[in-house]
Amino acid sequence: MLEAVFAPTSVYDADTGEEVDFGIDVGIPDNIAEMNVLASDSEFVDIRVRLQGHTAFCPIGNSVEGAFTITVTRAGNYAILSGQHRQMPNHEIFLTSFGEGSTTIVYQRQYASPVCLVNWACPLAEMGGYQGTY
């Protein structure tokens, strides 16, 4: 089963670390979570994932977005072949092994700057080259 998880958005005070605001955007028609199988056989699957969404704190016309291609093998290996994402907010990709019930984080990056809420003001982060076992 392929699943995209959109978590609520929080804003924290940089000095104290306390949450100062919280928001969820519901029903925005241009939120996208697409996952397509590019190739597969009995030993592996290549998946292309594309996400685009708005948070309660994105300026109008901007969005949180990213896309990546990942290979997952039956033997328990993964490799992110390529991908990029905006550097806001924090990003995390994980795989869940349903047979064992375990979850493995395969990619994680903290946000670069609140400036990255404006699409043109922040370079994209590269995701290719991450690999390991799950």
Image: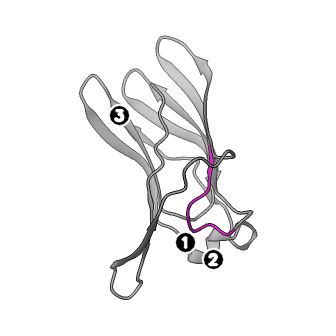
**Helix, strand or loop for disc 2:** helix
Q: Which numbered disc, 3 or 2, marks the residue that appears first in the sequence?
A: 3
Q: Amino acid at mark 1?
A: Ala
Label 2, label 1: how far apart the Cα atoms are: 8 Å
**Helix, strand or loop for disc 1:** loop
Label 3, label 1: how far apart the Cα atoms are: 27 Å
At x 62% / y 20%, what residue is drawn? Answer: 39
- Which tag is nearer the camera, tag 2 or tag 1? 2
At x 46% / y 44%, what residue is drawn? Answer: 5
Magenta segment, which residues? Answer: 51-59
Quadrant of image for the C terminus? top left
Is 101 included in the stretch rendered in magenta?
no
Which residue is under mark 3? 96
- Which tag is nearer the camera, tag 3 or tag 2? 2
Which residue is under mark 2? 115
Which residue is under mark 1? 112
Q: Which numbered disc, 3 or 1, marks the residue that appears first in the sequence?
A: 3
Quadrant in the rendering for residue 114: bottom right
